[in-house]
Image (spheres, helix red, strand yellow):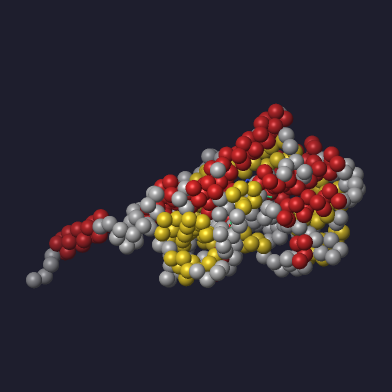
Amino acid sequence: MTQSRREFLRSAVAAAASTALLPVPAVAQGAAPRVVVVGGGFAGASCARALRGADPRIAVTLVEANATFTACPLSNAVIAGLRELSAQQFTYERVAADGITLARTTATAVDAPARAVTLAEGTRLPYDRLVLAPGIDIRWGALPGYDEPAAAHLPHAWRAGEQTLLLKRQLEAMADGGLVVIAAPANPFRCPPGPYERASLIAHYLKTKKPRSKLIVLDAKDAFSKQRLFQSAWSELYPGLLEWVPLSKGGAVTSVDAATRTLVTDFGRHRADVANVIPPQKAGRIAKAAGVADRSGWCPIDPATFESRLQAGIHVIGDAAIAGAMPKSAFAANSQAKACAAAVARLVTGGTPSSPKLINTCYSLVAPDYGISVAGVYQPAGGQLAEVPGAGGVSPAGAPRATRALEAALAESWFRTITSEVFG
Ligand SMILES: Cc1cc2nc3c(=O)[nH]c(=O)nc-3n(C[C@H](O)[C@H](O)[C@H](O)COP(=O)(O)OP(=O)(O)OC[C@H]3O[C@@H](n4cnc5c(N)ncnc54)[C@H](O)[C@@H]3O)c2cc1C
């Protein structure tokens, strides 16, 4: 007996509907879903806690190499002698108190088909879903002459800790009248306004402690985040002290000589007394080992779930991810972590993730009592995270100093709030 076209369509629709309604168990019946999070920074620690908050049945393991996390936001103030490094440091006690299993080690490999992470000592950790939040690694050698030993002479201070203190000590040891040079990288990199906040606070240090000195920023770009606000503040606060050299005027550093602290550009050589080289970066190395980094070194993701476009079952959040219009910031990492946790909590229980809206605000200090900010709202559009038009903006140009002082206080209170949410 032949089926009529109408009957065929009716049964096909009924079959599709019943499939859609069938619960798809993502994990074995009765077993607690297992999520492993690699990296206990702003993205990973936030995600681990948000997963437990979303569904306490999920068994969450956080793999983090260090016992103490050292935060980058406000670390430029440490370099300028305005803050102690200890104010940047946080432990994982409260994270563990949430019922998260902590693995104090490094994840070295991922077996995506078998869904297992290998830890440094060889243990295999099985997962139903894996979240990678490894932050950045330096692309050693991408800038000729800048390898790991060179960083001991020309600190990058782009991962907070010893490098931060090294740069601070070098500035303290420099004689008044010295030349400080900062090399800023091409996009994309961690914290787009970070090099310019650093230049500002080092300029503040020089103005107040070593006023005959000079600071040059050699930039591999012609434009940067909050540029007009920074530049107008520089001409007000640091005239003649801070010089920014864009790409088009010979700013791109093409090689360095660590022994003589020399930064070479196509237009000349700059022999510095203190040189801060912020080098090209890539996703933390576990991303490549897991097969989730593309040729750019960063990780393409689905903008609604943060699931890797290269490996099923692995999500990537924070600086390591290619998050469209979202900058690589701690605020963004925390925002992505919560959206990813909500999606993963649904996926491991057979649900369907909803489409998120994410926010970011980046504060920068131009002086201790002078803050500026940029904010944005983002949502999935066209396969990427796109900025919602008209929802964000920057601090007003020409605002009174009281407004700048208020924003400086907001920067500090934002830091207290986010670190207490993530680690407190
Ligand atoms: C100077 C400076 C100033 C900044 N200022 C601001 C600011 O004002 N506001 C702002 O929002 N952002 C700021 N940022 C950016 C911010 O620090 C980063 O965007 C943020 O830290 C990204 O979070 P993450 O979790 O992706 O990476 P991270 O915070 O770096 O965390 C990654 C973690 O993963 C761990 N890890 C990596 N690989 C492994 C592995 N294989 N196994 C186990 N653990 C691993 C690391 O030990 C680390 O703890 C600043 C950055 C810099 C450098």
Q: x%, y% of residue 144? A: 75, 68
Q: What residue is drawn where x is 62% and y is 43%? A: 362
Q: What residue is drawn where x is 13% and y is 67%? A: 3
Q: Is residue 36 left or right of residue 91?
A: left
Q: x%, y% of residue 322? A: 55, 58
Q: Is residue 343 above or below residue 108?
A: above
Q: x%, y% of residue 30? A: 30, 58
Considering depth in this image, is 132 or 264 the residue closer to the camera?
132
| Residue 299 shows up from this direction | yes
Q: What residue is drawn where x is 74% and y is 67%? A: 147
Image quadrant holding the C terminus, namely top right
Q: Is residue 107 left or right of residue 28?
A: right
Considering depth in this image, is 129 or 372 the residue closer to the camera?
129
Q: Is residue 307 left or right of residue 176?
A: left
Q: Is residue 27 left or right of residue 51?
A: left
| Residue 375 shows up from this direction | no
Q: x%, y% of residue 332? A: 56, 48
